[in-house]
Each structure stands twice: as structure tokens, then as C-alpha cells.
Image (tube, rainbow, N blue to C red):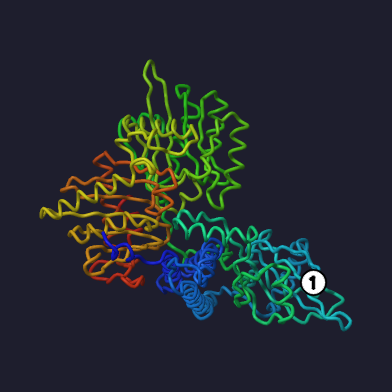
Amino acid sequence: MGQKTETALFNRDLSWLKFNERILMEAERETVPLLERIKFLSIFSSNLDEFYRVRMPVLLALEKLSNREDNDIKIEADLLNTANALITDQQQRYGKTLKENIIPQLKANHINLVYGKPFPAGIKKQVTRYFLSQVLAFMQPVSLTSETNFFPSNNALYFLVTLNKEGNEQSVILNIPSNELARFYKVELEDETYVVFLDDIVRFHLDLIFKDAEITGCFSFKVTRDAEIDLKDEYSGSLSEQLEAQLLKRDSGLATRFLHQPGIPKNVLVLLKKIFNLKKANMVEGGQYHNLKDFMGFPVSNSKLSNASWPKLCNTDVVNGSLTDEIVKNDIIIHTPYQSYDSVLRFFNEAAIDPDVQEIYLTIYRVASDSKIINALISAAKNGKKVFVLVELKARFDEANNIKWAKKMKAQGVEIVYSVTALKVHAKVALVKRKTGNRMLYTGLLATGNFNESTAAFYTDHILMTANKAILREIELLFIFLAKRVKPSSADLIKFEHILVAQFNLQQKFIEWIDREIAHAKSGHEASITIKLNNLEEKVLINKLYEASQAGVEITMLVRSICRLIPGVKGLSENIKVIRIVDRYLEHGRVFIFNNLGKQEVYLGSADWMNRNIYRRIEVCFPVYDEKIKTEILNLVDIQKQDNVQAVVIDAQMNNIPVKKDGTLIASQHDIYEFLKN
């Protein structure tokens, strides 16, 4: 397409930070219930911690490479400074919202967040009792000297306490045990509720820990460490190799940020920098309280200050019969979290106990810590069925949980296969084979999200239950391939006709269908594409969308998070609109709709349009053939396209622009719930 479209991309990291700004906008909005605004503060803080773990190491390495005179690789100018400026601005907005808006409104509702000052007399005795009976058990002070050997855990909370003991200045590192105890402690007194930080419970009882010393200072800090990243997902050739070399020079889990309360004596800060190996970390002065993601556990419930309850809807009314029989009659679709996840659990439970079931196949990426699905698979294996589970051990931050379940399943007779080293399996598919008489009956689940009953409570996803033999035969072929534990090569590519599988036919099919819409537009026919994703990054597909826009194809993109496509640029993307929706649930489903001269093709699936999903993972997207379900999906997406309450549009400068509120107010998640209820 030429140089123009190749370079017309938003920066990935800045786009991600603009998504986090959209989260912050919900915390700032007066129309959002007060306790829900506190949750959005928590999500913003959690996201920013992840950014420092996963993305900041790359930005720091890029900055170093850009300063090398021998480097002819073009690196985006001033990227690190721009990112830091965005973060600083957002953190200032965060602090202002919390202090000037949310805390006063809590107080007006008789909820007192006590911070930065001694406890009110009425609650002091109870708080001290809690400190002595519960908190003191976890106190582990460490004297700070040039010989100190101490490794602060990632994102754990600590105090640097300065003491004067008989005329000698001393410094001590003291843990704040927020991983062992709740971050907030609540005291009810008459008609008032008091909520205190665990930090302050420790801070205001230091005299009970250091009884023979004068406490001269107490400063909070935390260290954020990098997480493993695969740079081949983003960069190719020389730049990827140079970045890898930069990162490999550093210790595992190197600190990327030292966030501390202002006022730590300079000589102590120098010592901390040395013993914590902080020479490559961002030294950031912050507030008194860190890890405000812990606001997710704010210990107050009040229906008047929270979202109205939306009881889970039931879309399968089979009580006495078999769910399998219903699936054989007609495809069933479940839209979480609006609809109950019970049918998914029942699918596996019935398979585990059904004497006709011979084989069960499943992919696992992220499962619940107390997964009922895994327990059903263990029961199935104990009941004599062949159970095959592909476990992805490289699911970032879920590695330990996946290893735990894999070992447990293997010990109980489940056949466990791990994906190959350089290839993640991100597909969300399950297959059950029953033998009834002389014939084999296939039923399956194909989903846009993980088989995880915990995240199903707040991730919007679609789960298709089907007995379509053509689709499920191809799912079986995929499982046969995965069992070989090899990377796809041109020699052994399976010809999938119905499902789209990354590494096999997924990108090619999407390009083919975009080209078809381009041809229709050039022939004077109505041509349109609607795509819903979590992230949009991959250049080939973005350039193809630019080409479609230039041909007159009307394109609507619903993109929750990273979006590198620049919409609304004359001569490039003026026919592309990008919508971002943030509300009570996390938008997670991926939907692909191609107009096809009015005979709309609808696909759902696991694949975002990112380099990692297209080139380095096994992803599955699947067709919606059932006309009733297809109409339902089209209706749900149409409601989201009309959202003028929770939606913003992304402009050509990457800004989140609230949608103009013309006519009827449409908050898509609320309207989808009402649509499915009726």
C-alpha cells in the first residue's frame, strides 16, 4: 500500500495508556455510583502496575538504543518522555478525583476513609487491639546497612523507618503485610463507618515495635519488577535482537520502578538504590499510599452507592432432560456475564458421568483457582473416559495456577499435553465424543473467552454450544495436530474449511473477506465491516482496513484497549470509526461481521488482531451458522454501535471523545441485558 499506510499507526504503548485514561474517566464521572468509581480507581492502578512490569522495560531499552550513535534503526523519538508525561498527568487526575471528590462524598454518606492522621479517639482502642492480635504476627523488620541482603518482592508494600537510638541514626525496612491481611480495616461506631489503611495501622503503632528508639521518619515504598516479554511479538530483525540483548544483560525481575513517598533522606536513598540494584529503575516520588488497586477490596457495601443488581439470566431451561439432546436439536449460545455460566459447567458435568461419553478434549489458557471444570475432567478420567487437555503454561501471570492444575489432572489419569515452546495455544475449544449404538456423536464448546467460571462473572464473552459435525470434525483435527507438539509448517497444514485457525488460514481468510467487501464497494454495492476486538495492532490487517476505507467500505471497529489504527484521516481512513466501551463489565468478546451483499457472515473467536495472536499463537475463530443466533449477535453488536453513554470514539490524535448524546440514551451493557431478558 505504500509508505503512508505503513507508517500511519498509533504507538502501541501510548494507545494502551490512553485506554487506561478511559478507565480513569469512569472514576471521574459523577453519574457512576460512588463505590463503583472506587473500583475503577482500583482497575486503573492495577493496569498501571502491569504497564510498569511488562511495557516499561521495553521503553527503557528503546531509549538506551536510541541514544547509541552506531544505531541506524529508526526509533520513535521521545517515546519514554511522552509515556511518562501521560502517566504523570493521569496520576494527578487520580489523586484529585480521590481527595477532592470521592473521599468527601464517602464522608457525606457516613463513610470515613481515615488516612494520613492519627485515628479518631472512638476507634483507636479497637484498631490497637487488631494490631496486637493480628498484624503484629507478620512484622519482620530488617536493619538497613551497606551489608544488608534484602530483595523486595514485586509490588509488595514496605516502610523505610528512620530511628534515633541513643544518639545513633538507624534505618529499618519494615513490611506492610497486605498480601497476608486485608488492606483495609473497618470499624462501625454508632452511625458512622470508619475505614483505615493497614499501612496506617502499622505506621501509628511503630512505638510498639521499636520500643527503645525515637522514630524520626516513616516513608512508604514499593519496587515494581519487569515481567517476561517476547519481543518477537512486536519487533522483527535487528531491532528485536538488540532489544533482547539489552534486556538479557539485566538480572531476572529487574526493578523498573522504585515508587516512594517523598522525604527519604538522600544518603538512605543512595543506599537503597545500591542494595536493591535500582540503577536502571525509574525513581518516582509518589504519594503516601501505593497499590491502590487494593481499593477493589474496599470493605463497604451499600446498594444505594453501587450498581443496580442484574441477576444472571438463564437461556437453557432444560431441567430433567439432557443438555446434549438440546444441543443436538439446535445450537445454543451463552452471553456471559449477562447469562448464567451454569450451562457450561453442566456441559462438562454431564460429559463426566454419561456412560456413552468416550472422549473429552479441552484447551486451557486461564482457569479459575478452584475450577469446577477441571474437577469434572478429573471425575471423567476416573470414570474411565479418555480426557485430553492441552495446557498452556505460558499464560502470563497464570503460570503457577496452570502448573498446579496440570499436575493434579495428570495424577488422576488425564492426558496432559503442553504447547511447544515458541507457540502459545490461546484457542478456547472443547470437544466431547459419545458413542450411541454404532455412531459417534460430537458436541462441542467454542468460546471467545477462557473456560473460567470466575472471569465469566465480569467478562463479556460468547460461548457457542454446537453439534455441527463439520465444525467439530475440524476441531478434532486441530486437537490431533496439537497432540503432535510441533509448529505448523507448509508441509502439514490442515485445510480448514469452516473454522479459522491462526498459523493455518485465519489471516488469509480475513484478508480475503476484506478484499470481497472492497470489490463490492468498487462495484457500487453497499459494503461494510464491523469488528470487535480487545486489541488492534497487526500492520498487514490494519493496512488492509485502510485500503478498504479508501475504496468506500464503511468500517466500524469496537476496540477496548490497544488500537494502533488511526481513524478519520482524509485519504486514508475517513470511513473507519473506532469505538471504545468501558462499563461495569470488561468487554472481551471478539466478533467479525462482513456484509457480503446483505448475506452477512458472522464469526466469533479468541483472536485479537495483534502480532502475537496472528503469528505466534494457535487461535480459533468460528462461524455462526444458526440464523437465530446470528441475528442475536447482530442485534447485540448494533446496540453497542449505538451506545452514547458509555462509549467514546477515538479520534486521529488518540483522544477518548465522548459520543454526542442525541436522542434516546443508550448504555449498551444495560440495553443488552434488557434485550436478553426479554
Q: Is residue 17 left or right of residue 193?
A: left
Confirm whether residue 144 shows in the render.
yes
Residue 256 versus residue 314: which sits nearer the camera? Answer: 256
Element marked by disc 1: loop
Q: Which residue is mark 1?
A: 146
Q: Is residue 113 left or right of residue 144?
A: left
Q: Residue 283's x, y, as percent?
A: 61, 74
**On the rendered image, what quadrant is the N terminus found in?**
bottom left
Quarter of image, res 547: bottom left
Name the residue: 42% across, 66% down: 19
Residue 365 versus residue 100: which sits nearer the camera? Answer: 365
Does residue 483 lie above or below 221 as drawn?
A: above
Residue 57 versus residue 208: which sits nearer the camera? Answer: 57
Confirm whether residue 323 shows in the render.
no
- Return the residue found at the far left: 524
Q: Residue 27's x, y, as percent?
A: 46, 71
- Return the residue found at the far right: 166
Q: Residues within 10 Å of mark 1 (few under 14, many from 20)?
A: few
How many marks on residues? 1
The amino acid type, in three-letter code, at marker 1 is Ser
Q: Residue 413's x, y, as percent?
A: 59, 28
- Return the residue found at the far top: 438
Q: Is residue 54 left or right of residue 176?
A: left
Q: Residue 580's x, y, as percent?
A: 35, 63
Does residue 668 lie above or below 430 as drawn?
A: below
- Return the residue found at the far bottom: 167
Name the residue: 36% across, 70% down: 654
Quarter of image, res 540: bottom left
